[in-house]
Image (tube, helix red, strand yellow):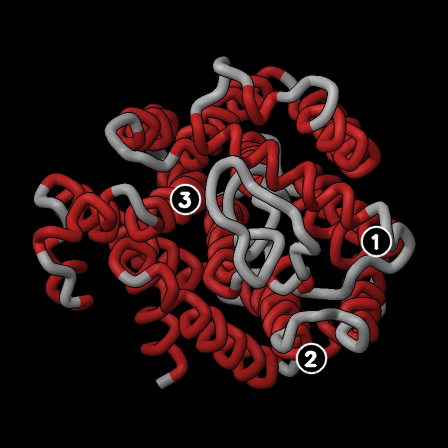
Amino acid sequence: MPRVLAGAAALLLGPVAAVAPRGLPVWAILVLVLSLAGLARQGAFGRILRLTPAVAAVAAFLALALASSLWSPSDRAAATVGEIGYIALGALAGGAWIAGLPGPEVRRLAGLFLAGGLAGGLLFAAEAALDFPLNRWWNGVPDDQLPNLLNGNVPKRTAALLCLLVWPAALAVDRYGRRALALLLPAGYALACLPLTSRSAMLGIAAGLATLAAARASARWTRRLFAAAVTAAFLLVLPAALLFSGPLDLDNSGLLFRSAQHRVEIWGHAAERALRTPVFGQGIDASRSLPPEGAVSEFSPIGDSLLPLHPHNAFLQVWLETGAVGAALVLAVLLMLLAATARLDRRAQPFALALFASALAMGSTAYGIWQPWWMSGFLAAALMLRLAARIGEQTR
């Protein structure tokens, strides 16, 4: 039964991402249970009990987030900590479980992931071409609400998730000996993104393609550039947000499209609030519940909360909710994750760095970083990349 469930999880990942992206937390929980059961069968629980620097940093962040729920204005603060917790445990247990799988099982699961990813991509393409009939039927969307659906978050969520999953899929194709096709896969997805309304997905796939090219030339220097960029992002995000919305007045610049102007305004509001509590932040999940205190928006009415659920920037959200302490811990985790890509073999590293770039680009512009379906997307892409990388280990 566990083998059947593992195969189903690999096969269904693509279709779930394509038609029900907000259902991904169910997938993440299933994989967590399978991973813990698999480690128990392997007698390998010791793999997840070691207090490595990465585990210690994540545990410290979770402790900070839990403590901050005491002063967070959000009534979902504790639930958000729980959601971050099961995603973190899923990453730890899932990675350890995949590391211990036998070679034939690795190839079987990777093949099922590729088959499901192809099915999900084709299903999403058909849905987009036909104005999302399945989604409209499932959610009872009337014809006169079609423009809201097309311009809303339904297609954008799937586009963002597929932008993450395309990199482990490309690595798996490379591992199966189709190296030219492995390069064409993300390029083809980039072309498919052009008719979509998700500019974040376009940015993500473009960043990934540029990084893939750079890392194929030198993975070491690409890693160093990303380490510098991530560090600079955490150090400079607050002054940059204030500069963009203040002296540069980019929220009124004709050089930006309207949603980008609104992003700049949101960033300015979030940065101002972050500076009020610079050490420990406003509290986990506070973004969705900050009182507006008379603030006015030029783009949409401000209701009970200052921000529309989140600041649309992961670096800024971490600063706002957990302060400098949280920012330092998350930076440490990201740098350790980046360094871990060096332990992959030479051909796998460009795909891992491309995934890192896509995630970073979309995380800096799109969804709230603690949204369960979005965290589950990051988890799924990382675990599938680890699975794809292991195909090569069996042939060396």
Q: Residues within 10 Å of mark 1 (few under 14, many from 20)?
A: many
Quadrant placement of the N terminus: bottom left
Q: Label 1 to label 2, Cα distance in Å?
A: 34 Å
Q: Is residue 371 visible?
A: yes
Query: Closer to the camera, 26 or 262?
Result: 262
Apparent side of residue 33 relative to residue 122 in the rendered image (left or right): right
289 vs 294: above or below: below
Q: Amino acid at mark 1?
A: Gly
Q: Of the residues under marks 3 and 1, which one precedes in the sequence?
A: 3
Would you identify the image quadrant in which residue 357 lies? top right
Tag 3's secondary structure? helix
Q: Position of residue 222 (x, y in %)?
A: 67, 23
Apparent side of residue 166 relative to residue 357 in the rendered image (left or right): left
Q: Which mark is residue 45?
A: 2
Apparent side of residue 153 relative to residue 225 in the rendered image (left or right): left
Q: Label 3 to label 1, Cα distance in Å?
A: 27 Å
Q: Which residue is mark 3?
A: 160
Q: Amino acid at mark 3?
A: Ala
Residue pushed farthest right?
A: 279
Q: Residues within 10 Å of mark 3 (few under 14, many from 20)?
A: many
Q: Which residue is mark 1?
A: 323
Residue at image coords 28%, 42%: 151
Q: Position of residue 369 (x, y in %)?
A: 59, 54
Q: Amino acid at mark 2?
A: Phe
Residue at image coords 41%, 65%: 24
